Image: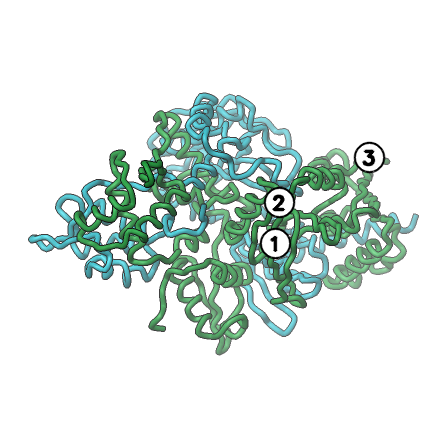
Amino acid sequence: MSDFNELIKSAAKSRDYIRDFYVYGFKSRQDFDRKSSRTYDNERRRIESWLAPYIKWEQNGTVKNVFLAFDTNALRQNPLYRIFEAKSFTDNDIMLHFYLLDMLFDGRRLTADDLSNEIAERYGEDIDVQIVRKKANEYVSEGLFMSERCGKKLRYFLSRNPVLSKKTSDALKTALCFYQTASPIGFMGYSLMKSENLLNDIFVMKHGYFVHALEEEILLKLLEAIKEGRRVILKTESNKSEAKNLERSMDAVPLRIYVSTRSGRRFLCLYVPAKKYFFSVRLDHIKEVKIGEKITDYIKYRRLYEAGEGKCYGVSFGDAVHTDSIKLTLRIMEPEENYILKRLETEARGGKITRVGENTYTYEISVFDGNELTPWVKTFIGRIVSFESSNEYLTEKFKRDLKQMMKMYDVLEIDGKAGRFELGEASM
Amino acid sequence: MEFFSEIYGCYYKIVSEILKRAEKEGVSKQEIFSITESIGFAESAVTVPDKLISGEWHLLEKNEAGKYKSVLKNTVSQPLALIQKRWLKTVINDSRIGLFMDEESITELNNVLSDVEPLWNGSDFNYYDRFGNGDDFASEEYRKSFRLGMEAIRSNLIMDFKYNSAKGRKSVKSCLPLKIEYSSKNDRFRLIALRLPVKSDADSKPIVDYYRFDGIKGASVREADEAAAAKKSSLGPIDSLIRKNSCEEPVRLLISNRRNALERAMLHFANYDKDTRQIDENTWECLIYYDKMMETELLIEILSFGPVLRVAGPDSFIGLIRERLKKQAEIFGTFGAH
């Protein structure tokens, strides 16, 4: 492993490995079938180097499983941001970085020729003027430098940082402690905190999906395309076992980012003009984004989508024509279980709640894809009087699942009263 | 506008810190190693000091005293990048920003960032399954309580307030704030605090309470008495104290890889501390370490998966699942007969 380097050119490959280490957490060397064992060893060593405090391993027979473990509820910052601090660079890159900042200090404005000459004088280094110019232009596009035309040449100078009152500066520092983990593209907050040597001494996250950090580079490109109303060409790969490693390419109109705060999944809702349908793709399935041309009638697609959005329970548009009607009847004992009613109201997502009798309530909704509703319905197990749907498949699947769960936990067999009852007879 | 760039990188940060320390008298070789180890990755010390000392990165020069001095003439700092400014502009338009600063500061920030565009607009995101009863971040009372909570944490102050619990109970509380917790699912902040009065004996276990900010009324802060201050300083790291509520025995889940359950469960429970291993061709065991306070939440999350997840322990947790299923069977028995 003589060629081992902690730094990397692209985060794409490491992103996938970290996801497997962190999200799955049980894979051994043999399970990483994407690349060679040597690649796995290098990736593992890098991840161990970046995230040393969070690495655990377990010996399972002769197989060693290495995994990342952390409780997001108790962390001050997102450890996975470390990956984005590992971009590789050349010797010239790092020297130029500090030389240029030094030479342009105090408002000096210099051309690439001036800079190149001064590098030789001040630091005794001979760096070609073309390389200096390239770096200076790169820093102009990153916003670190600004440039102005001086005859035929460009003069470069440092961008000025915003000057803030102490009150605002202090408040902003505290806000950074929160937003670095709570906001999308939080790595930017993290990087600001690092440059100011700030520590988050106040905030912790409950229900924080830190794994989202791995998608941020992809997300940023999608947000840029949405903001500018541009097409995107996506390369996607499903994590589903049956479609694993199957890459697809998609030319689409990006519309909105959907975030599930409960399942940890984030999606891009998009329109596929070639097939004339709306679709959602998980951000962690998107491997590459290319931003295409501006769409002249972008607003039309956005409005079309917003018109149908109300019929989406989650992220699925189904065929965007037919809807599944669902009626859930629940037993909620009044008044001691009013907190359940409150929960129902809080989580209703536009569904209609009606008190139909003593201790009995119905919840009714009509959505493109009723299948998205069934996990939530199951959270009311213990109170469900009936589950009805215009889609017979859903009711049958629900019955089957419930019956299987009762068998799984010996409820049908051991309880006399329940044991006599056949699920199919229930008013479902 | 690159997201993944060396300008936010760990090595640039290490070198920047070393150069700052190397301005006047210079730094020793040992200090170079020590700074690298404290900021860098686990193996950075193999590369960075050698590059600097050998002159491959010609940024330091050895002086007569044997120390390494910066070749730079000035104390440099990296200006904010465009993407960082755009992110800040986005954040100051967020609905929660009023908790951290007043209108005057928000206007000040908007003015200094007037030439940059936010990275996104609020309507570009839809948190589609977020609970519908999130906190009212615009409430003056809420903002006041929040700011007092932050002040109390940083200055070790006691916070007194009237509290309306979620179940409608009213009480008067005094506590020593430790942290503020945010839940994206609930879009809600809670104050994590040490219960007062604390017992004076050193061995007594501290009690940590959670208060919803929207239930806190008429808050004020005051200096902590000696016993409370001593207790807080004896607690050790607050993060580990919060974790002490974790159940001794984790929930043991058996996951059958049907309906993509393994992948769904792994992501769904990614916000818990967990260990997973494959136990046969189609079954995985996942141990979830959870906070006792979140037991009901975890229970219904597991129920939502249906029969593709099975709780195999501990018995107390299996009991909770069976209790719900028995109730369900009873309801079907009763209603089904009609």
Residue B1 position, x and y percent, is: 45, 45
Give amino acid for label 1.
Answer: Ile
Kindly identify which chain the residue marked by label 3 belongs to: A
Describe the element under mark 1 as helix, strand or loop.
strand
Q: CA distance from mark 2 to mark 1?
A: 16 Å
Instruction: Tell me the element at label 2.
Output: strand
Question: What residue would you read off at disc 1?
Answer: A233
Question: Do the residues bearing badges 1 and 3 touch, measured as CB atoms within 8 Å?
Answer: no
Camera-side residue of B140 and A420:
B140
Chain ID of residue with mark 2: A
Q: Quadrant of the N terminus of chain A?
A: bottom left
Tag 2 or tag 3, which sits nearer the N-term? Answer: 2
The part of the image, by quadrant, that contains residue B58 is bottom left
- Tell me: residue B193, above or below residue A6: above
Residue B246 can be seen in this image: no
Q: Mark number for residue A257?
A: 2
Residue B314 relative to residue A304: left or right: left
Residue type indicated by callout 3: Thr
Distance from disc 3 to disc 2, alpha carbons, whole Å, reads 32 Å
Same-chain status of marks 1 and 3: yes
Q: Secondary structure at mark 3?
A: strand
Q: Which mark is residue A354?
A: 3
Residue type marked 2: Ile
Is label 1 or label 3 in front? 1
Write down the colour of chain B.
cyan
Question: Where does the image place residue A94, in percent across and percent down from the top left?
Answer: 30, 53
